[in-house]
Image (spheres, rainbow, N blue to C red):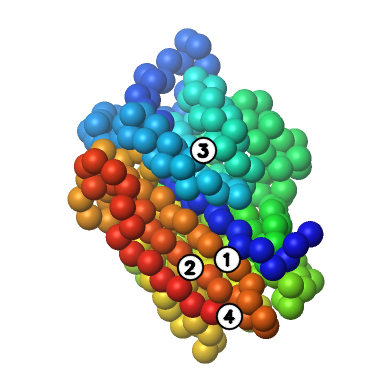
Amino acid sequence: MDRGRAVRIAHLSDLHISPVPLPRPWIEAVHLKQVLGYINWLRGRGAHSRFRLDLTMAAIAGAEPDAIALSGDIIELGMSSEFAAGATILSDLLSIAPLALTLGNHDPYTPASIRRLQTYWERFLPGGATTATDPREAYPQVWSSGPLALITLCSGTPTWLFSAEGAIGRAQMQRLDAMLAALDRTAQVPVLHIHHPPDTAQLSALQRLRDGDQLLDVMARHDCPLILHGHTHRGDIRQLSCLGKRLVLAGASSASAVATRGPAAAGFNLIDLSRSDDCFHIAVSAQRFDGSAYITFDKREWTV
């Protein structure tokens, strides 16, 4: 493997494929959470568009990424018809580049949703995720190319009514810790990928990553410079300090958002990583749809 060549990742999130079908208990079991979720979706109907998602996917294809990181919330209510529609989208993305998929809080919306996603998304999920009671048991997953080790975590798990929380869990966090400790840092840089952002201060108690602080500690201890996430529907690049280490967080807005202004406009991120001499160069470019085309509205570059 040529570990010195440049690698490009396209990062998108929160597809929320529309329209959302009416929950029909005479076809499959329906949870109260799905009924309430459908009512909530009706209130915001029109916020997402399949046409806008198609434009986003075309822009990603034009960027010619080496891999695609999809940060979850592909669907809305965890019903079989949604998973079938999602499988078509995932197949289209996989035809562009290798796909690193994680789950958001809307994908395993209820315990029954886990069985459905394992059926419809088997070819897109890590092997263990298709049989485990909890798909998080199959994570972290690593996609490696050149100087990059893209490490995908899973924070999506069924939650109570009105909750959009996520959790990595102790076992997955321990596996991540061991994985980062074993990585040859002279050859590769780890970039993490998850649905929920780890900086919990910006979110309510019902939206946060429960173990976000622990994740930031693991990142800092292992000098992990960058994490990609979704969930907030805001495209932004920000940094914080943890244990004296600089950590960069890149959020992707919804790839299907109808909005064309501000951080909530449809968008995606491009991450370029290359090696030069004894350092690695990282560039994160945030792309936003301005009503006619995708433009770069923010870009950060640094070396590690």
Please name the residue that numbered disc 4 is placed on: 304
Query: What's the distance in space between the residues labelled 3 and 1, CA to CA?
Result: 30 Å
- Near mark 2 (Cα within 10 A), the count class, few <14, some 14-19 or many ≥20, is some
Q: In which quarter of the view is residue 140 placed?
A: bottom right
Q: Which element carries disc 2, helix, strand or loop?
A: strand
Query: What's the distance in space between the residues labelled 1 and 4, CA to CA?
Result: 11 Å
Query: What's the distance in space between the residues labelled 2 and 4, CA to CA?
Result: 11 Å
Taking depth in this image into account, of 287 and 169 the one nearest to the observer is 287
Q: In which quarter of the view is residue 93 placed?
A: top right
Q: Which element carries disc 4, helix, strand or loop?
A: loop
Please name the residue that numbered disc 3 is placed on: 107
Cβ–Cβ below 8 Å for labels 2 and 1? yes
Please name the residue that numbered disc 2 is placed on: 283
Q: What residue type is labelled 3?
A: Asp
Residue 285: give x, y in percent of width and height. 41, 61
Residue at 71% over, 57% down: 144
